[in-house]
Image: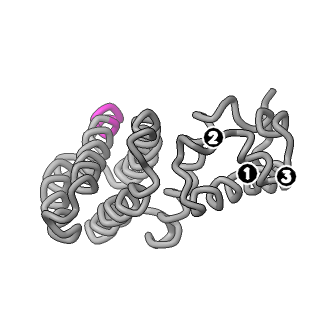
Amino acid sequence: MHMNTNDPRVKRTRQLLMQAFMELLEQKKSVSSITIQDITAYATVNRSTFYAHFEDKFAFLESWMREKFQEKLKNELPNAALSDIGSLRTLILIVFDFLFCTRPYMTLADRQHETLFEAAMQKELYDLLFTWLSEQAEPFVSRETVETTALIASWGIFGAAVEWSRHPQYRSAEDMARDVLVVVAAGLAPVLG
């Protein structure tokens, strides 16, 4: 069954489920300890409603991560878009901060979800970088080159942020982001000219 995600009722229900999950997380529960039953009870919807919106808990968690990351991008990146190297720096810092803020929710038991969260965030980064590079690429640069460049840059930013978030005490996010920006900007240069 295909659901119209623009339907106000669908949006409202999804928002209820997401809000319930966030409130449960804030009650010091870990991601893995929260069940679908917990979410639906807190949101005051039945399980069949949950399954009408999400295939399973993994689909829900991926959607939650993407929505939270998109929300942060909208709040901190002008127009939620890249326009220059300054906005790329902002994007890198957003990724670092987002991972730093979400890491406390992840316990050892939650490691099973880590790759799911990583894939969701990296995909959002890729989409943003691909859109920007497609708009700004030199006319002679092929679509395949833009795709590859966006893929490498998104994984480079994300991978550096994941590693930093595991040990933030060794280096400030600002210092790490500055170095990541230098490397990523060099990788984007052939596409942007």
Task: Give the quadrant of residue 12.
Answer: bottom right
| Front residue of 18 and 27 | 27
Tag 2–tag 1 contact (CB < 8 Å): yes
Circle 2 packing at 10 Å, graded few (<14), some (14-19), many (20+), is: many
Residue drawn at (74%, 40%) of the image:
37
Task: Give the quadrant of residue 22.
Answer: bottom right
* Residue occupied by mark 2: 60
Magenta part of the protein: which range? 142-147
Front of the two marks 3 and 1: 3
Residue drawn at (35%, 61%) of the image:
100
Q: Is residue 29 left or right of residue 140?
A: right
Q: Real-space Cα distance between discs 3 and 2? A: 17 Å
Q: Earlier in the sequence, mark 3 or mark 1?
A: 1
Amino acid, disc 3? Thr
* Residue occupied by mark 1: 17
Tag 3–tag 2 contact (CB < 8 Å): no
Residue 178 marker:
none
